[in-house]
Image (spheres, coloured by chain):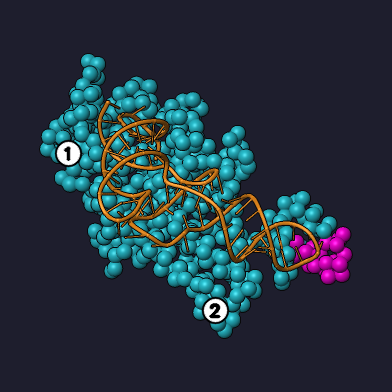
Amino acid sequence: MEHQLYIHNTLSRKKELFVPIKEPMVGMYVCGPTVYGDAHLGHARPAITFDILFRWLKYSGYKVRYVRNITDVGHLEHDADDGEDKIEKKARLEQLEPMEVVQHFTLRYHDAMKALNVLPPSIEPRASGHIPEQIEYARKILESGFAYESGGSVYFDVEKYNKHHRYGILSGRNIDDIVENTRSLDGQSEKRRSVDFALWKKASAEHIMRWHSEWSDGFPGWHLECSAMGQKYLGEKFDIHGGGMDLIFPHHECEIAQSVAAVGHQAVKYWIHNNMITINGQKMGKSLGNFITLEEFFTGSHKLLDSAYSPMTIRFFILQAHYRSTVDFSNEALIASQKGLSRLTEAYDRLQKITPSVTTSVETKDWATMCREAMNDDLNTPIVISHLFDAAKAINTVYDTKATISQADLDSLKKLFDTYIDILGLQTEQSSSKYLDSYKKAVDLLLSLRLEAKQSKNWALSDRIRDELASYGFVVKDTKEGFEWSL
RNA sequence: GGUUCCUUGACCGAGAGGCUAGGUAGCGGUCUGCAAAACCGUCAACAGCAGUUCGAAUCUGCUAGGAACCUCCA
């Protein structure tokens, strides 16, 4: 198999040629959400980024197993010593069973992802469903000597690990500095060093989410789930691990240490991280309280939003920036994306209606190759989109009967759009229910009547039809052949 | 304080030592009963300063401003 994809590996800080460990199989693990609140725009970024990678790898001929987890236990607020479990806190506030919270927000997350046309992963494991695996993983680390038990909890011994391996290779951190800076521990702590992190936490009396283990009744540490579940479903060594850049330290750094301690080597070949979405130049985040949920975008119900933005607009907006750059949210930028997207989808619709000629007089380029090269260059979706706009220009020119196109060129144009609309996951409205069909026919009928009115120069009637339809939200466009409309 | 990174035209956003990025907005035109759409043309940019080079937005240094991580965060 020919390898053409270059992808940026956080571990080396370089673009590397992607060569899977076991062709044609590709194993990909991506950190999913902690389900204690609605997904916001920031959550859409990794979901869409890795959705694109998932689609592109499949298109390139690989057999991909994509695992994206749901974190539903063990993710604490503040730090591992005094933080409360996020799920449990939400449950307490809402007077719900923790698993009710988990179920509720998992379903809402799925709805949002579906709206964004994010493909479901191959496996979507939950941390709470893999407690034995996590206990076993902690046990292995304990056996290898890189963890210690303290008061019913188990902690990873970062300082000891760092003597044999290097803690900090992913984030470029020098752990000696961290240890120096954080040596002041209050004597009460069970941890030897504040950099140590929990593999297993003993549950306090009032803690509801608890499982039995040889150390105590308790729950697993947050970093453990990804190591345990990733290697369970993808093997001891797998190709890709992804997530947001903010997870590099400590989460992914800890995962590397866990894997090296447990099985003797790193689990992941390519670490891939998407950048953040910012709002007024600042990271959008739950703890900063400056986030806008996806639902609020879809309905426009947030004070910073001038209007509602469709899921496809959001998706297109995100794809117009490279995944390793920050994207700054603004109404202006979203409106620009919205208009750009509709320009592209209109060109796609027109493409279906073009009748070919014997020869091609419109300027065409080898867009298929150009798009493939852009995708293979670290998933450069903004460049792919710019090529599609270029092709759209050609489509419009032909549609406007100002140039011609041959059957062969038309076919390759159709193939180009079909391919990349699919890879970028830009749905075109194809929902066709009985009601929708009848309604479309009714609008078509009205506009045919308007056309007749125009032909008999009854401007009053034709303008009335157009203006009234406009007041209901329809956009009517006259074309050489007749008319087009959209909502 | 430590580590990493960013600063591109009115706005968003690619690129990367010499070749028009693209989108949105603006301006002029073609088309049109009018409008919209479409098309054509057009404007305009690489934070500042100094250096390397035949040539720098792209490399180096400094200055200014901003961000992320170092605590939970996608």
The residue depicted at 60 percent of the width and 70 percent of the height is A397
User: What's the residue type where badge 1 is placed?
Assistant: Arg
The picture places residue A428, in percent across and down from the top left corner, at 57, 60
Magenta-drawn stretch contains A446: yes
**Amino acid on which disc 2 is placed:** Thr
Image x and y of residue A59, in percent = 39, 64
Is A395 one of the magenta-colored residues? no
Label number found at residue A166: 1
Q: Which is more N-terminal, label 2 or label 1?
A: 1
Q: Which chain is cyan?
A: A
Q: Can residue A222 be seen in this snapshot?
A: yes
Foreground of the two, A65 or A282: A282
The colour of chain B is: orange
**Pointer 2 local density, CA inside 10 Å: few below 14, some 14–19, many at least 20:** some
- Residue A360's tag is 2
The span picked out in magenta is A443-462
Query: Going by the image, does A124 lie left or right of A406?
Result: left
- Count of number-bearing discs: 2
Q: Nearer the viewer, residue A206 or A447?
A: A447
Residue A485, above or below A402: above
Q: Residues within 10 Å of mark 1 (few under 14, many from 20)?
A: some
Image point (29%, 65%), residue name:
A3
Mark 1 lies on a secondary structure that is loop
Q: CA distance from mark 1 to mark 2?
A: 61 Å
Quarter occupied by the N terminus of chain A: bottom left
Q: Both on one chain, marks 1 and 2?
A: yes
Picture residue at 38% right of the left edge, 22% below the top: A206
Q: Is residue A33 left or right of residue A417?
A: left
The secondary element bearing badge 2 is classed as loop
